[in-house]
Amino acid sequence: RDHMWGLHVPRRVQELRNRVRVSIRELSLSLDGHTPSVAQVAEHCGLSEEDVTIGMEALESYSTLSLDAELPGADDGYALVDTLGSPEPG
């Protein structure tokens, strides 16, 4: 299952991501669709708030984007690479 990530992520972080994802899904159902707080997720899955935060960050980094991909809503072909700065001389 490590081959699904776009870059190397430690096993522990992958497991935190999975636990946090499941807890958020379960809590959202009981909270009428509201997003649970970090503290609620931590209590629900028996993790520290720091571990929940790490898991949530891993949730957002599961898939990678191409620098050549057109930005959403950009009709002029503006790509993510166009937002990067240039090296400064010297």
Image: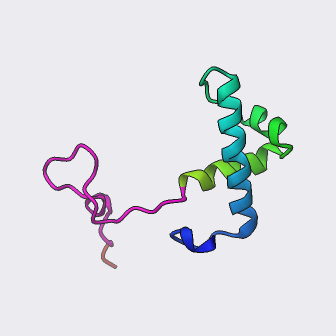
Q: Is residue 11 above or below residue 34?
A: below
Q: Position of residue 19 (x, y in %)?
A: 74, 50
Asked if one can make out residue 70 in the rendered structure from this viewpoint, the answer is yes
Is residue 31 shown in magenta?
A: no
Q: Position of residue 23 (x, y in %)?
A: 72, 40
Query: Of all residues shown, which one is farthest toward the left?
Result: 76
Please tell me which residue is depicted at 34% across the width and 79% down the height of the picture.
90
Q: Is residue 37 left or right of residue 81?
A: right
Q: Identify the residue shown where x is 73% and y is 59%.
A: 15
Is 21 on the left or on the right of 86, as rendered? right
In the image, residue 1 above or below residue 44: below
Bounds of the magenta span?
61-87
Q: Residue at x 72, y 36 (%)?
A: 38
Q: Could you tell me residue 48's position as x and y percent?
A: 83, 45
Most common SS among magenta residues: loop
Determine the residue located farthest toward the right in the rendered image.
Answer: 46
Q: Is residue 26 left or right of residue 48?
A: left
The quadrant where residue 68 appears: bottom left
- Residue 66 in the image: state x and y as whole percent: 35, 65
Q: Quadrant of the N terminus?
A: bottom right
